[in-house]
Image (cartoon, coloured by chain):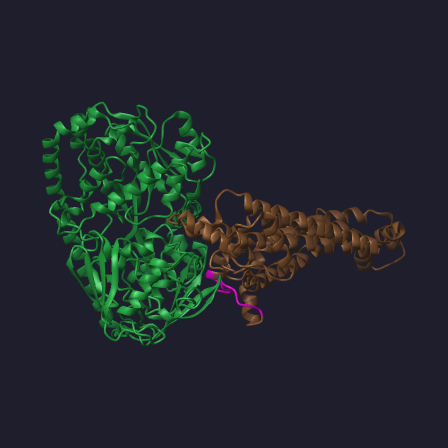
Amino acid sequence: MLRYITTRIVSSLFILWVISVLVFALMNILPGDPAAGILGVEATPELIEATKRRLGLDKPLPERYGRWIWNALQGDLGTSLIGEVSINQYFERRVPATMQLGILSLIVVIAIAIPVGVLSALRPGSKKEVGASTLMIVGNSIPEFLTGIALVIVLGLEFGWFPIFGYVPFWEDPAENMKHMALPVIAVSLTATTLLMRQTRSAMINVLTDDYIRTARAKGLRERIVIVRHGLRNALIPIVTVFGFQAGLIFSGAVITETVFSIPGMGRLFVEAVVQERDYAVTQNVTMFFAVSVILVNLLIDLSYPFLDPRIRMGAEASE
Amino acid sequence: MSERSYWQRMRRRSMSRRSLLRASARAGVGAAGLALVGCGGDDDDDQPAAAEAQQQDQPQQQAMQQQDADQQAMQQQQQEQQAAVAQAEQQEQQQQAAQATGGPRRGGTLQHSWFEDPQGGFDPHIGITGGDALGYWVHIYDRLLGFDDQARVIPMLASAIEIPDDVTYLFTMREGAIFQDGAPVDANAVQLNMERIRDVKDLAGGTRNRGGIQYADFFEATDDATWKLVNGEPFGPTLAFFQQFPGTGLLISPEHFDTAVTNPVGAGHLKHVVHEPGERWVGERWDGYWDNDNVHLDGFVQNIIPDQNTAWNAFLNGDIDIDAPTGGVNSDLQAELEADGMKVIRGTAQTWTQTWFNLNPNAPTGDLPFNAFRDPRMRHAYNRALDRQAINEVAWEGLGAPSRAPVSVESWALAKDANYYPGHDLQVAHELMDAAGYGDGIEGIHLSYIAEFQTVVTEPVNSQMRNAGMEMEYIKGTEAEIIPRLLATQDWTIGTLSWESPFDPDPVLRPSFEGLQNWMYGSPEGGPRTGRASTADYPNDQVLANLNATEQLVWDAAVPASQDDRVPLYEKVWEAEEEHMWFPYIAQWPANWVAQPHVENFEIIPFFGFPKGMSFKGIWFNNV
């Protein structure tokens, strides 16, 4: 078991390292001089060189990479090329917004997708099941930004139930925070729920045809126990796998939602750094944030497998 | 927010909603495509035949020029009269409104939206974008001079300006004006600011910040009250640079030079309170401001909303007090908004559409169709063939303006007849083409453009040119798409539709132009380059020199009114640009602004196109 966990962690770290090398390399082989980009077309070659020296851009690539990674491991993400602001400051303010959006969305996704998926599997082809599936498919078909705009118009402007832009940190005003997060969370989760719901339905249908389910019913167990403890638990592996995939998409896809709802999160920071400011230092750190988020989620998913399925745990222990 | 529901308003203006969404899509494309395709072109060496023909037809040219000047003067007079009438009506309405509401009241916090944080921070001497100036600096910093609704010079921190000769400017500092930290705004502070602008190492703003002192021989504080600037040679636009945004002379308190990026201290009407990146900037009224009697609001919040649709929805929801809807305000939307009590003003923006031709003599040789425009008669013919008012009507329901020289004659020290506006006359166009030897027309000219929203102008221009016998094809695409095609056909692009004034060094245009130059002339290794070239590895010094020389010639053309050889601006520019570039202006874009019912004294400066120059000074709320 320990070996299983260790292997997963080491492979995740290796993937992270590979991504960091790729990200750093891409940022530095892109055409264009970051110093010239900062200074504008009026800059003289001397000024560009001086700026490069000041920002450390004249150092060899391996040295710059090493310094970046070493400092990052100690919690120092460096300074932005534009305005020379500490990148840590950006993260301190923006990460909570993105994390909250992602986590709340995932909670909503789980709360809707799994029960609806299970109920759909229990009554396949019924009117309710068809209706729920249709709604989910429609929700998934509409692009996230359109869903967001529609929510703004209907729930924000027409009914005035929710604010339509901005963000209030949770620790400043929890109630206002929740009001501001409501529409973005709905927009994100509406799109993400369908896939998980359909995966749940499919997995449950497969499981419910197994012999042990019939045995459990034959033993006289209550239907709820049969479905949840025997059925759902055995169907969880593919459900959790898809959930991990969705989580990665939600975190990395925050760009659109944060832009539409004007939430100061990591997605918007990425757009600003890339499109508006061409700030390579911020861009590579934000990219690594998304990479770490996705890999972390998948690592947690991998580590959960032995606990969800004893066969995997026993197999891991046996190999040790 | 109005009692009538949002849906009711949307249903009633379904057409305008579609146009709004379409305009939003255009804005999205436009924002992503801000890097223009440069224009370029190559050219033969000078054509002796054309020059000779040009000399022989000089009397005819002069006669036509006189005719043009007369017509232009008459048109200008009519336009000025119309503008004066409109202004008088607007002032009367405002006075009536003020009387009805009891006059300006102090109080309230104006909620506005801006699409981005200040990219370079709050230091106007090292910031790089106009967005920083308009969104943030204009509230915190005052400058030496301002402009009124006719773009004329008005005093600000300099209470008077004296120009004893062509090169000397004496600024008298306003008595009693202080910075927000209490330091005096005197000539010594100006001197320190100008020295910093001249000397600061990371001056990314370039000419835009240094413009007013770029030709300075020296400047000094002759005493506490007088700051003196002496140019090495006459430079007409000197005062314009001290007026404009961001311009030269946004004054920072010298004690706070080092911290201005994050903690700005200026002499403007708002003090910096807090900047929450990605969320908002907050400023509050500062009671030590020299013009405090004209500041009525308690504070200002710049909400950072990158998506224009969201900003517009926020305005409709009442969260934002003033907004400029993407795509403008057509008559349907205006009627809807005014029925809800909103205030709508329509004016022109500081954005022009122009065609930009490169007539560089150092371009590769070849008998190419656009060589015809090296003949001034063909350039005249092009201008005559353009019906600018018709384009304005087609593109923007007439809300823009047929484009004249995009500068104020007073600010740029130009002669009155510098605002040359050739009127539409197809017959004259044909006569000019005949005289130039192109009576059968010309064809095969390609102009490039990159943004879909530019088609509102490209299509009517293309149609008009075809009527005149000038077959032009507009090619849409990115630089990477268009250039290889043009290289393959040996048909160099000669122009692009732009939307900025050439008198304002435009960091958007320049990289594109340089990039195209590099494509055209090849890399040091030979052959076309891929991607956009940087200034550092610019391969063709001669082209760069020509480009810089062209800009120099353009500046030189704007000579002070005291010089004797006063000619219309475009003529002067054409003569200077005969070897280089030519950019006839087509139209000035509309600027439409809307405000909530409680906003009073809501007016825009026509030349600048923004409310109160974007400072919102003078605005007050009638519900406090």
Colour in which chain A is shown?
brown
Of residue B135 and residue B531, the one placed in the foreground of this image is B531
Of residue B516 and residue B474, the one placed in the foreground of this image is B516
Horizontal relation, residue B597 to residue A289: left or right: left
Horizontal relation, residue A144 to residue B590: left or right: right
Q: Quadrant of residue B601?
A: bottom left
Magenta-tinted stretch: A157-170
Colour in which chain B is shown?
green
Q: Position of residue A8 (x, y in %)?
A: 76, 52
Magenta: main secondary structure: loop
Residue at horizontal 40%, vertical 25%? B489
Q: Position of residue B605 (x, y in %)?
A: 26, 58
Q: Is residue B102 above or below residue B167?
A: below
Q: Is residue B272 magenta?
A: no
Q: Is residue B405 above or below residue B164?
A: above
Q: What number of labels is visible?
A: 0
* Residue A289 in view, yes or no: no
Q: Is residue A168 magenta?
A: yes
Q: Position of residue B517 (x, y in %)?
A: 38, 36
* Residue B156 in view, yes or no: yes
